[in-house]
Amino acid sequence: MKYHVDDRGYYGDFGGAFIPEMLYPNVEELRQNYLKLMYQDDFQKEFHQLLKDYVGRPSPLYFANRLSEKYNCKVYLKREDLNHTGAHKVNNTIGQILMAKKLGKKRIIAETGAGQHGVATATVCALMGIDCVVYMGEIDIARQAPNVARMKMLGATVKPALSGSRTLKDATNEAIRDWINNPVDTHYIIGSAIGPHPYPDMVTRFQSVISEEIKWQLKEKEGRELPDYVVACIGGGSNAAGTYYHFLDEKEVGIIAVEAAGKGVNSGESAATSKLGKEGIIHGCKTLLMQTKDGQITEPYSISAGLDYPGVGPLHSHLYKSGRGEFYSATDDEAMEAGLELTQLEGIIPAIETSHALALFKYKTFKPDDVVVISLSGRGDKDLQTYIDYFKL
Ligand SMILES: *Cc1c(COP(=O)(O)O)cnc(C)c1O
C-alpha cells in the first residue's frame, strides 16, 4: 500500500483536482512548479532560517511526566503551541509565502473560519510586505472579533462572505472567485491539507518539519527514531499530516487520528467526518465528506472552531479507508475535560482543537513502555473565553 500522493494527485481513491475550467491555469502553474521550487537550495535555506529565527523552531519534544504516570505509558508532546502565532499553521504559511514570491505573485488571498489561518497568513504577508485579502464569513467575523482585529492590525483586508451560511464554506467560495478573477498576480494560500492537488501534498510537505524533528528529538531522548504511536487531532488534517509524514511507511508506528464528535457522533451536531462521511467533492478534491442523501454538504459542528469542517484531507480519507490509521472521535465534553486535565497535570493550556487529541486516553489504553507522541497543535489563549464559560471559572 502506498500512502504518499501519486503523479495524478491521488492518495488511493482520494484527492485529484476537481476545479472549474477557469481555475485550471492557476492550479496547473502551481502543480508544475511546486516541487521544483520547494527543493531548490535557496528556498530550503530561507524556509528553514525563518522557521528557526521567526517561528522559533525546532519546537520542543516534551516528556509529559505526570500525564505519562496517569496513563501508564510514555507520553511526549510536540510543542507546536510554542510557535510564533501559537499553532502549527504558520509552518505552512511561511512555506506558501515563499512559494508565492518564487512564482512572482504580488498579492495573497486566503479563507478563514475561526481566523487562525487568516492571522497566520496576514502575519507572513506583513513579514514580506505583500498585499493580503482574507475572506471570512459574516457570522464568523462577528464571533471571532479578536482575530479580525489582529488581521487588520497586521495590515490585511478582511472581506466578509455574505452568501449561504456565511461561514467557512462561503468564505472559500469567495476566495476561489477572487482567484479566478486575478489569475496572474495572486496566490491563494489554503490553510489545511485540503483543496485541489497539489495543495494537500504541498501543505503536508511544509508541515512535515514536525515529524522530521520528532525523529531526531526522539533519538536523543529514547535512543530510537520511531515512536510506537503518533497522535493528532484532525480538522482538515494539516497538523496530523505533518506529524505522520515521516512515519507513513514505517509499519511499526501506529497512526492515530482524533476527530470532533461535537455533541455525539450520531447527534446531528458533529464533525466526525471519517465516521459519517461519504465520498464526495469539496473544495476541489475527492474525499470523505459529511453530506445528505442527495449530496448537499451538511453543516458541521464542534465546540472548537478549527475542527468544524465537513470534509477531511484526502490523505486522511485514504489512511481511514486503508486501515493504516486508527480513527477516534471525542465529544465537546470529553475534549474540554482533557484540556483541563493537561492544564492541571502539566501546566499547559492547550487549544480546544488539541484537547480532542488528548481525549484519546478515554478510548485507548497503551502498554507501559509504549512511546506515544501527541501533536500539541496550538495554545489555548484564543479559547480562554470558551473554557471560562464551560467551567464557569
Ligand atoms: C486550525 C487548527 C487545527 C485544525 O487544523 P488541521 O489542518 O486539521 O491541523 C488544529 N489545531 C489548532 C491549534 C488549529 O489552530
Image: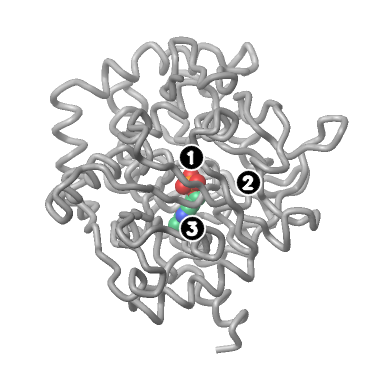
Residue ID for mark 3: 357
Q: For the residues marked 1 and 3, what is the alpha-carbon distance in whole angstroms?
A: 17 Å
Disc 1 C-beta below 8 A from ligand 1: yes
Residue ID for mark 2: 309
Image coordinates of residue 155 in percent, x first then y, are: 40, 52
Numbered disc 2: secondary structure: loop
Q: Residue at x 45, y 21 (%)?
A: 198
Which mark, residue 192? 1
Give whichever of 69, 131 is nearer the camera: 69
Between marks 2 and 3 in the image, the one whose residue lies nearer the viewer: 3
Image coordinates of residue 190 in percent, x first then y, are: 48, 36
Q: Is residue 41 above or below residue 323?
A: above
**Quadrant of res 342:** bottom left
Res 97 visible? no
Do the residues under discs 2 and 1 have CB atoms within 8 angstroms? Answer: yes
Disc 2 C-beta below 8 A from ligand 1: yes
Give whichever of 90, 177 is nearer the camera: 90
Amino acid under disc 3: Ala
Give whichever of 185, 262 is nearer the camera: 262
